[in-house]
Every structure is written in C-alpha cells, then in structure tokens.
Amino acid sequence: MRTAIRLTQAHFHDVAGHFLALSRRDRLLRFGLEMSDVQIVAYVDSLFASNDSAFVVVEPNRDVSGALHLESMGFGVTVGLSVSSWARSLGIGTLLLERAAATARARGIKALFVRNLNGNTGLQQVALRAGMTVVCAPNALITQLEVPAANDHSVDCDGFAGKITLADDSLRPQWNGRWRDAPMLELPEPVLL
C-alpha cells in the first residue's frame, strides 16, 4: 500500500530526480513557471530549510512517484503537487490531495491555492473525484469539466468531501478579500467546477 510520508534529507536526490524528470509543461503546472534544472535543485534544497509541510510517495525501488508541498504564503497555503509520468492513474495524486486536505483541516484551513489550476485539468479532475470544490478564474479556458469514473487505483476520500476548496492562485487576492472584513472592489464571480 502506498503512503505519503514526510520529506527528509535522505530523500534529497530522489526528490530532485523526480522534479528534474518533469516535462517543461509539467514544470510549468507544478511551479507556476518553467524552472531550470539549477532552479529545481535550489528549490529542493530550500524545502529542508523551510517550515512548510512536504510529503513524498516513495516506491520500493526508492523512486519518488509523487511529491506534495504545502507552502504558507501570507493569507493561505499554496499547494504544489506533482506525479511522475510513469505513475499517473495509480491514485498517487489522490493520495497526495488527501494528505493536503488532512493537513489543511488540522490547521483550520478551508481553501488551498494552486498555481495554474485553470489549465491543469488533470488536477481538477482528481480534486473533483475526491469530493473537493474546485474554483477557477472566470477567464479560465475550462468552464465545464466531466468527472471521470473512479478507477481501480482510486483512494476513497469521502472523509473530506466538500470541506476543502482548491482554488486557482490568481483568485487569492479576491478570495482573501472575502474572508477579511475589508471592503473590496466588485470582481466577477469565480467559476465553480
């Protein structure tokens, strides 16, 4: 059975290898920009110096099949999640989202932000299948999304259904304005998927 474990210094090379193996598009979706190899190694190094929560799914052969980083950023937490291309459709993303939701609930957080969620239909589908609310910016390319049926590798996530919202990071200023009592400009409503 796979499990998401807390990242330790012993995982440094395996985690760096996981991120370095991501395609350009996957790096863009995961980090919000196309990071160079040097930037990725520096990012992995920074994970050990931060107080943020980071988890990995390590296979028996020590390959990292997925990684999760919950980065505290002012108002809210940004989720960075990646699954190795060879490990997709095995429930790794769902397992990591389940860990993110459990960690958020323990901290009293109801919304998690994701860079480039608007264009990441794979993560949107996983989140919807897991029972999370997905919120994208009004100008997102996707306005409707079919939730695929669960496969044999799905993780049962009924424990957090409907309690955590996954929102595109571009909505953070609008979202934070709603949760504080400060007045804000009228902005278009986000698209709920």
Image (cartoon, rainbow, N blue to C red):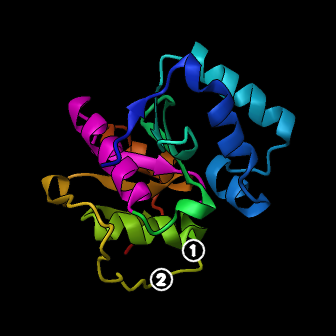
Q: Specify whether residue 5 is in view.
A: yes
Q: Which residues are magenta?
A: 91-116
* Residue 141 drawn at (x, y percent): 59, 79
Say which mark, if any, is on residue 140: 1
Residue at the far top: name it. Answer: 49
Question: Foreground: 126 or 190?
Answer: 126
Q: CA distance from mark 1 to mark 2?
A: 7 Å
Amino acid type, callout 1: Ala
Amino acid type, callout 2: Thr
* Residue 163 drawn at (x, y percent): 19, 53
Q: Specify whether residue 189 is in view.
A: no
| Mark 1 and mark 2 residues within 8 Å of each other at the beta carbon | yes
Q: Residues within 10 Å of mark 2 (few under 14, many from 20)?
A: few
Say which mark, if any, is on residue 143: 2
Asked whether residue 173 is drawn in magenta, I would say no
Task: Identify which residue is drawn at 34% across, 52% down.
Answer: 95
